[in-house]
Image (spheres, rainbow, N blue to C red):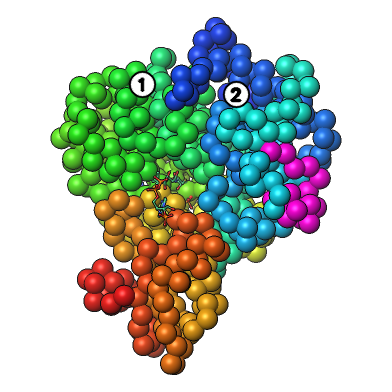
Amino acid sequence: MPSPTSGNANLFAALRAAFPSELNTCAVEIDSGLRYSWQDLDQATAMVANLLEFLDVPKGARIAVQVDKSVEALVLYLATLRAGLVYLPLNTAYQSAEMAYFLEDAKPSVVVCSGRNFGWISKMAFLAGTGHVFTLNDDRTGSLLDRASQFPTHHTIANRDADDLAAIIYTSGTTGRSKGAMLSHGNLLSNARVLQTYWDWKPGDVLIHALPIFHVHGLFVAIHGALINGSKMVWCAKFDPQVVLQHFPRATVFMGVPTLYVRLLAEAGLTPQVTKNMRLFVSGSAPMLVDTHRQWQARTGHTILERYGMSETVMLTSNPGRLADGERRVGSVGKPLPGVLLRVCDEAGNELPQGETGGIEVRGPNVFQGYWQMPEKTAQEFTADGFFKTGDVGRLDAQGYVTIVGRSKDLIISGGYNVYPAEIEGSINNLPGVLESAVVGVPDADFGEVGVAVIVPKPGATIDPTQVIVALKAMMANFKVPKRCVFVAELPRNAMGKVQKNLLRDSCRAGGTTG
Ligand code: MCA
Ligand code: AMP
């Protein structure tokens, strides 16, 4: 798609233009009651952007960030955009082996980590060729802010084209190797603008931000949604259902993965009265059970708006925010967003008629620029006519509503986080006494789905399941570690020798494979 030749397509320029004219009003309020004004956001992002520019890193340089959630971390994200550099957020749960991979692969020019991890992360970063490592803690301390405080509070927003990169989001792969999805300013801005209209954001809306800010949902959908609307955010460092309930009466919009709704439903304080001021509840990142939707309707009188997206595409489909665009259908992820072309195809790539189930393929201004330094992998994931193959399986109905019925990719979504079995199996197979393994997802009331490791011990070996879990926790982010291990004499395979995960899933679900 051609880039606009006039104007600055930098996403930050559009977000900044949406700040209210009264800059002294509150932009973000945190749990302690501390308030940041729009002026604070403007000046703080200018100072950090000036620092980043002073470092004189090349255009396209990556700023890798693994820090706890704070408004200063939000400032760092916005400042990276403002300086025209590329933001690379990393989940705080990632352990050293995962971090080493990301830093080696992305070769960031700047790394920002929390002070408690500086020792090991700085060593790793310098080995990967990073020139600058700063610290940023969630109590407004650290070398990043110390250095930035010496820079001016005004800054000219860097000029960027719509196709220039704004962020790289790592997403795991079916092969076990993480891929960096490259998103441009144009990808992110087009999606933010479409959602502002489709979800019917209104002047005076207030968002409760309770998601982590290292993935698409919390970082892009929630933050861009509020900022492009000039809306205040009530900022929660961590999700705590009781704190969120206290915020409902003075907010209007809430976004969560299904686990957040399940945990809110467990609170006796969730009533129509407490949600009376709320206008919009959004859910996504994982399928929401029809039962959760129904319970939410019964307890609050609100119908949750479910939407569907990916790291590679930001948001793809959504139930409508306003009645004029149609009803909100429980069990459907809604319609393709304006500008998104979506089709359902068979394995040979032929488009299927309405109502038939197949692979979901998409095209649009929101679809990413490819995987970081993986041109062959990128080419494999696109069709000849430019559609991205999502790996999700679904169908379209006569009114254009999409229902997701499964995934062709071997993926477990646990509490909104993606877990790719191949990565976990690789680590389990290297443990002493293990011949081979398969990781499958089983339903879970809290996380929606959790991983179970099915392990074949070597002949004569005895494996302690607790030791397996302890060993895995040292190697990978906690949410990826299977919740349970079961042992079998052999894995079921089909005639092609492929492990039949559906059989394992069924027997684990039925409790038939003992642990
Ligand atoms: C924590 N644990 C988990 C998860 N989170 N296990 C599996 N899946 C998880 N998601 C582990 C902890 O490590 C701990 O293990 C134990 O479970 C209990 O932790 P708990 O204190 O309950 O966890 P928490 O801190 O309350 O976190 C739960 C959470 C969190 C709030 C649901 O997982 C979360 O914020 N999820 C949101 C993820 C998200 O933002 N996804 C958006 C991706 P142990 O006791 O053994 O130490 S963006 C995306 O998918 C696309 C593009 C989209 O469409 O949005
Ligand atoms: P990620 O790799 O984190 O970008 O996760 C993207 C995947 O999350 C999609 O390919 C879907 O499988 C899944 N997903 C996101 N939203 C929904 C939803 N509302 N319902 C079902 N699956 C979803």
Which residue is depicted at the point 58% across and 30% down?
A: 139
**In which quadrant of the rendered image does the C terminus lie?**
bottom left
Label 2 Cα neighbours within 10 Å, binned few <14 / some 14-19 / many ≥20: some
Q: Secondary structure at mark 1?
A: loop
Q: Secondary structure at mark 2?
A: helix
Q: Is residue 55 left or right of residue 105?
A: right
- State the CA–CA distance, disc 1 to disc 2: 24 Å
Q: Position of residue 461 (x, y in %)?
A: 45, 88
Q: Position of residue 114 (x, y in %)?
A: 63, 41
**In which quadrant of the rendered image does the N terminus lie?**
top right
Report which residue position mark 1 lands on: 251
Q: Could you say which quadrant of the image residue 258 lies in? A: top left
Q: Which residues are magenta?
A: 121-135
Q: 93 or 203: nearer the eye?
A: 93
User: Does 125 appear in magenta?
Assistant: yes
Which residue is depicted at the point 41% across and 70% down?
A: 466
Q: Position of residue 485 (x, y in %)?
A: 37, 72
Ligand 1 within 8 Å, label 1 CB: no
Report which residue position mark 2 lands on: 14
Which residue is depicted at the point 44% across and 37% down?
A: 238
Residue 80 visible in the picture: no
